[in-house]
Amino acid sequence: MADDVKISKRKAFLPVTEDLESYLDQYDRLYSLPATYADLRGFTESYPLDDKHGNATHWASVLYPQEVREHLYPRLTSIYSLLRTGDMQAVPHLFVERVDFCEFGNSRPFRVRVVNQYNDNYDHFYLKVSDASRVYGLELEHLLSPNRINYLAHGGTLVEEHIAGVPGDAFIRDHLDRPEVNRVRIAKEFVKFSERCFIRLLGDMRSYNYVIDITPDFEDVQYRVRAIDFDQQSYEGRRNIYLPQFFKENNAVVWLCGKLLNLPTMQQYQDEERSLIARRYLSEHQRLSALIECMKKNPREPQDKVIQLAKELGEHHHTSRFDNCDSMGAIVETNLEVALARHLI
């Protein structure tokens, strides 16, 4: 196993710049929301939330005074309607059953459970502190991955849909050793996922920061690994932060890849993924270029990390093309061009 990498400090927030806000407005992500992250901070009580097996989680359910709840909850259902339909008009048969809060992680999210009173079906969405790194990560996921991302932004608030799937840590713990699991396909998808992360420089993909999307197929089951945490989009200076195989939480899957896939097969899967990313890169080039220009103009990003990452990626790719990169946006742009070069001809 490779040496474990650690992120020792809580990530500093990067402000959403005017350029990035204009970008969000242009591409229909910016809305005036009836409730904000700050509004949800007004809870007066909380109690720990266990999972369905009675195990402790990082979440706590929060309670609001009745007069606050009467005003806040209808606004939250309006936000849910806007996120799902593009219409602010709240659907009358939807109601907020519960609001949860998580102190763990950079974004300190609130999770809102919305229930259909006709059939008790429920869905979740999240309100988080707005952060430029996270916005960059959401947009790059939407543009370059096989997954569409639905989110809204407003001032200091991000609203995100729930990404369905089995949390990676739970999958490794509870599912990976089951006889019905196709472990070759799991290994294949982890290789592809790792390639996607490294090419667009999404970091900190420990097992609890991604989910396994499981889809029954006509002969077997298909798997897809999906990131759910985008706080570490091109922020840290160490190359290995962007390689999921270097996190000890992923050791079981990394071991599986080494056991079940030989080097030519891994290279085949990496090449397949690069080809798909290159097609998305070309089809979304105008929007991607606009995003990268925003990324190049964030004055608050730590320059020591920019210098370190440019150096380490130059050594990794055996090129001097990173030598003049003076921002994380420039590094992402160059990494895409270098990694996808053969497919962009």
Image (spheres, helix red, strand yellow):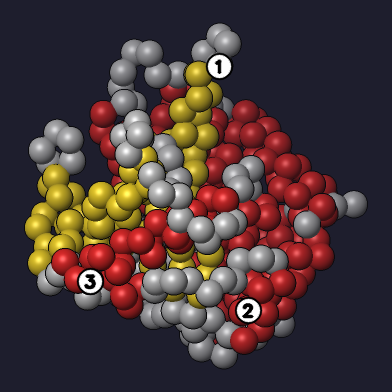
Q: Can residue 83 be seen at all in this image of the molecule? A: yes
Left or right: 265 as drawn, with respect to 69: right
**Mark 2 or mark 1: which comes first in sequence?**
2
Q: Could you give the CA–CA distance between mark 1 and mark 3, rounded to whole angstroms?
A: 47 Å
Q: Quadrant of residue 24?
A: bottom right
Whether pointer 2 and pointer 1 mark residues with C-beta atoms closer than 8 Å, the reply is no
Question: Which of these two is toward me, 218 or 242?
Answer: 218
**x, y percentage for residue 4?**
34, 55
Residue at point 32%, 56% (across, down): 111
Pointer 3: what residue?
A: 68
> Is residue 191 shown above or below 216?
below
Residue type highlighted by circle 1: Asp
Q: Which mark is residue 20?
A: 2
**x, y percentage for residue 340?**
76, 53
Q: Residues within 10 Å of mark 2 (few under 14, many from 20)?
A: many
Residue at point 53%, 50% (across, down): 84
Q: Viewer-nearest of labels 1 and 3?
A: 3
Pointer 1: what residue?
A: 217
Q: Could you give the CA–CA distance between mark 2 and mark 1, rounded to whole angstroms?
A: 40 Å
**Mark 1 or mark 3: which comes first in sequence?**
3
Q: Residues within 10 Å of mark 3 (few under 14, many from 20)?
A: some
Residue at point 31%, 18% (across, down): 178
In the orientation shown, which residue stands out farthest toward the right? 345
Q: Could you give the CA–CA distance between mark 2 and mark 3, rounded to whole angstroms?
A: 33 Å
Question: Which of these two is toward me, 154 or 261?
Answer: 154
Question: Which of these two is toward me, 50 or 65?
Answer: 65
Residue at point 67%, 52% (across, down): 144
Q: Which corner quadrant holds the N terminus?
A: top left
At mark 1, the secondary structure is loop
**Mark 2 or mark 3: which comes first in sequence?**
2
> Is residue 224 shown above or below 156?
above
